Amino acid sequence: MSEDLFEKIIAREIPAEIVYETETVLAFRDINPQAPTHILIIPKEKIRTINDISDHQTGLIGELYLAARDIAKQAGFADEGYRVVMNCGEAAGQAVWHIHLHLLAGRALTWPPG
Ligand code: AMP
């Protein structure tokens, strides 16, 4: 998968169904949804993996979770429940090298995940 796929979505060079945007964060529907609602929440600033997050980026990382909170409230599944997960590295299944929170909702989610 392209190294800079999500940068192309940020630049509107690749289409995506964008559901939320701020100056620093973008959220759009996953192309291969694993739940009735499956949204990816990304920082516009490129960070390859969790391992590459700098100490000064805590605010930005917090904004990803605030986006999840606001999307859940707006879409009406905040009280029902949802899952937010970020894969780090190949063993965890990370396929796009630009950090992204998966926001999953709309069905009962099992634990532990596969
Ligand atoms: P991960 O495996 O954690 O790196 O997740 C990457 C996610 O990006 C997968 O769930 C893919 O389905 C999703 N994805 C790949 N290409 C696109 C795209 N063009 N638009 C939206 N989601 C995509």
Image (cartoon, rainbow, N blue to C red):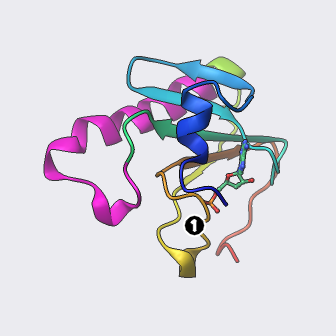
Amino acid of disc 1: Gln
Question: Relative to residue 42, is residue 34 drawn left or right?
Answer: right
Does 64 appear in magenta?
yes
Question: Relative to residue 54, is residue 68 drawn left or right?
Answer: right
Question: Relative to residue 86, is residue 38 drawn left or right?
Answer: right
Q: Nearer the viewer, residue 82 or 8?
A: 8
Q: Which residues are magenta?
A: 47-72
In the picture, the quarter occupied by the N terminus is: bottom right
Residue count near mark 1 (Cα–Cα under 10 Å), binned few <14, some 14–19, many ≥20: some
Quadrant in the picture for residue 41: top right
Q: Residue at x 55, y 82 (%)?
A: 91
Q: Residue at x 41, y 57 (%)?
A: 48
Asked whether residue 78 appears in the rendered view, the answer is no
Q: Residue at x 37, y 32 (%)?
A: 63
For label 1, being within 8 Å of ligand 1 is answered yes
Q: Nearer the viewer, residue 48 or 28?
A: 48
Residue 113 position (above or below residue 100): below
SS class, disc 1? loop
Return the residue at label 1: 94
